[in-house]
Amino acid sequence: MSTAPFHSVVYGPVKTRRLGTALGINLVPTATGACPPECIYCKTGQADAVPIVARINSVPSAGVIVTAAARRIISMSKAGEKLDCIVLSGNLDPTRHHQLLTITENLRDLRNKWFSKADLAILTDGSNLEPADHRRALQIYDLPILRFEWGTVKTFTAMTGRKPEDLKTLATHLTGMDRLILSATFVQGGPDNSVDAEVKAWIKRVEELRPKEVQIQTVDTGKGKVNKSRTVPVARLEEIAAQLTEKTGIATTVLAEEALTV
């Protein structure tokens, strides 16, 4: 899972496994200056394609975000470039932006006009689905990809820092959602959601939500550790995927590492 900063409203396009050639829309770009070499946006070679419009801790308005997205989408269309997906993903979980519905509706209209065959996707942990408008916004996406990787309340609070009751609230908000895709990142060390008991509890929760699809991955720790978490072997991920599919019949995919993550 990449932890590189995103310092513009628009970044990419980036080639990904699950979304194809994807253009990222980031709701809270960071300030530039000492940009690290792993910066996803700079690695596309288009650091000057879209103006930097926000500093650290500031949130661009819907108008600023949509204008930046429109410029890039229109320019790509006129240049005959390929685009499989427009995706909300970046520094801030999209559900934390108070104008999510407005942004989503405008991105849908831009997609429909300039790249009608492209999917509209959102990567989110659903940390702010209390507003009805936010839940309405999620229903617009072709690919609403929600983070959901906890079987027990103990693991949920340990991995997210959120209140115990938030897990039940999140499940309530996701129940019955059309086209729902769940994304689960399994880790070892520290909070470990890959042990048998935790996986069994997680499968039960997933079965209750009845998503269209489940995507399973792990962290990329390189040679060391990330927040005391360690990579789960691919063989274990495949075991978890097989258990879920056998128990629920839900299509499950084990994903390789890629840049666009929640």
Image: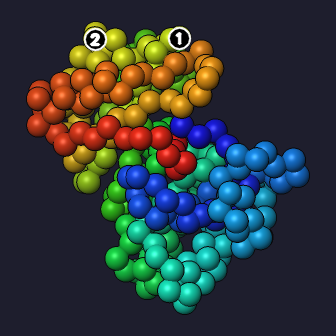
Residue 107 visible (yes or no) = yes
Q: Is residue 211 visible?
A: no
The amino acid pointed to by label 2 is Asp
**Residue nearest the viewer, comparing 132 with 38:** 38
> Is residue 212 left or right of 136 when viewed as pictured?
left
Q: How is the image coloured?
A: rainbow
| Res 14 quadrant in image | bottom right
Question: Residue 256: image x %, image y %?
Answer: 41, 41
Q: Mark 2: which secondary structure?
A: helix
In the rendered image, the vertical position of residue 5 relative to residue 67, given as above or below? above
Q: Is residue 214 left or right of residue 28?
A: left
Name the residue carrying label 2.
196
Q: Say which amino acid is labelled 1.
A: Gly
Q: Which mark is residue 190?
A: 1
Check if mark 1's residue and mark 2's residue have beta carbons within 8 Å.
Answer: no
Q: Residue at x 59, y 40 (%)?
A: 2
Near mark 1 (Cα within 10 A), the count class, few <14, some 14-19 or many ≥20, is few
Q: Earlier in the sequence, mark 1 or mark 2?
A: 1
| Mark pair 1, 2: CA separation | 16 Å
Q: Is residue 92 above or below residue 53?
A: above
Residue at horizontal 46 percent and vertical 72 percent from the top? 83
Q: Quadrant of the N terminus?
A: top right
- Residue at far right of view: 33
Q: Quadrant of residue 204?
A: top left
Image x and y of residue 196, in percent: 28, 11
